[in-house]
Image (cartoon, rainbow, N blue to C red):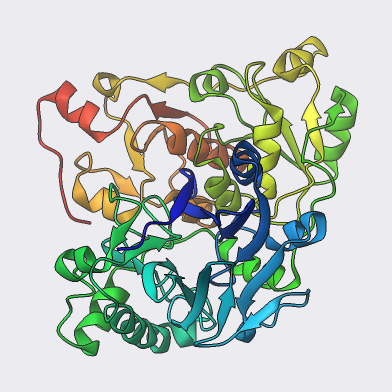
Amino acid sequence: MSSVDVVALVDEGLGNSAYLVDLGDGRALLVDVSLDLRSAWAATRRRGLRPAFAADTHLHADFLSGARHLADSEGTRVLASAAGGREFGHTALRDGDEVDLGGLRLRALATPGHTHEHLAFLLLDGDTPAGVFTGGSLLVGAAARTDLVAPERTEELARLQYRSLRRLATLPDDVAVWPTHGAGSFCSAPPGTRRTSTIGAEKAGNALLRAPDEEAFTEALLGSLGSFPAYFLTLAETNRRGVLLDGEPGLRALDVDTVRGLLADGAWLLDTRPVAEFGAAHVPGALSIPLRPAFASWLGWLVPPGRPLVIVRGPGQDPAEVAWQAAKIGYGPLAGELAGGLGAWTAAGHPVVRTPLVRAEDLGGRRVLDVRQEAEFAAGHVPGASHVELGALAARAGELPREPTVVMCGHGERAMSAAALLERSGHRDLAVLDGGPRDWARAEGRPLADGT
């Protein structure tokens, strides 16, 4: 097997991997690089490389591509599907087209399914296939969803996905599989799986690749589709046009009166502090999305696009991290941040709200609302708990009883976001479980219920 120098640049929050290929002559190939270019810049600079090529496997549904910005700022040559209709300069590739990288070659393989214009890229060292960048076609232990282009095309694309995976399975067993979407991506892959694989390993262990026929594959894939963040549906068109950064994202300081004016005009106040700090005191109407790797996913799921966003953060939280995570999914530039944080708000004499945390043993007889994903809820939940996924909660808040309620998830972060959304819609007497269903089971000495 050929040996090439490939480095995975993993975004744990979105569950995706970009890849850097050292071409051995001071140049690099980047594959499926996000608009959050910090890891790509760090990797190329550390190795003294110039990003000569940027290949995109598809018009991504879960992050903005950094390819156009690299072309504009670094002179990078963009490689992408001719069927994508991109409106900026790029090398438009069709099935079987090859690009000479200088010793290595990249061959485009039409692999529609996840999207209609999807390409995989086979990396060749001479005539030896070293690995294949599979994007959203063949994943580790899975295949990416097919319901992001248009609802009426979901089954059609699932059948195309079957054929694309069968095509990839004809590659030699020792060929590396380098997918873009991985564990944690709603696009999606099983939790806990490895980030990379080989064709042989996938033929042996990937249940979808082992489906006996197209009908069985299609039924299994369509049956696995869960919910996904609404922002997924907006980014493909944005990527078709291409995105340029206007400097590095950041947060400008806003005084209390300016923030109040923005809120009065419809801006959202987004509080990124940890759950316990938000629960102890927060600005009325603020939405809690704690700053963590999954911040961008929940921002894109819970906040309507196009709204001005004002940030409240803790003193130890990096403002650049907030701004970059927002930018990579198309939320930016942000309006700014409340200068002085919550302390400035209270010093100006404005009220705060408290959403208490409760322990599992202190639930009492209060109603329990579980906001985890459907599969999580079905795998084990507090008996008698009601269930609404966090992503669907804003639309359904008016249906829910207005009674004392403890909101819960797996650890507390999603539950506090849910409680904040309910508070925004007028619900009161809310608390958040500090922990998850297993904490309740241990405290009560009782088993969890399963099913829906």
Q: Quadrant of residue 446?
A: top left
Query: Which residue: 31% across, 67% down?
Result: 175
Q: Residue 336: where, in percent of width, then height?
A: 80, 34
Q: Nearer the viewer, residue 437 or 317?
A: 317
Q: Nearer the viewer, residue 226 or 349?
A: 226
How many numbered marks, from 0 up? 0
Q: Quadrant of the C terminus?
A: bottom left
Q: Quadrant of the N terminus?
A: bottom left
Q: Residue 204: where, in percent of width, then height?
A: 15, 67
Residue 270 in view in this figure: no
Q: Residue 399: where, in percent of width, then height?
A: 47, 54
Would residue 307 be found to the left or right of residue 102 on screen?
right
Residue most extreme to the top: 347
Residue 317 in view in this figure: yes
Q: Nearer the viewer, residue 66 or 407?
A: 66
Q: Quadrant of residue 210?
A: bottom left
- Above or below for 119 versus 394: below
Would residue 173 be found to the left or right of residue 156 on screen?
left
Would residue 48 be found to the left or right of residue 68 on screen?
left
Would residue 203 be found to the left or right of residue 144 on screen?
left
Query: Which residue: 78% across, 41% down?
Result: 248
Q: Nearer the viewer, residue 132 or 407?
A: 132
Query: Which residue: 71% across, 67% down?
Result: 77
Q: Residue 66: where, in percent of width, then height?
A: 68, 57
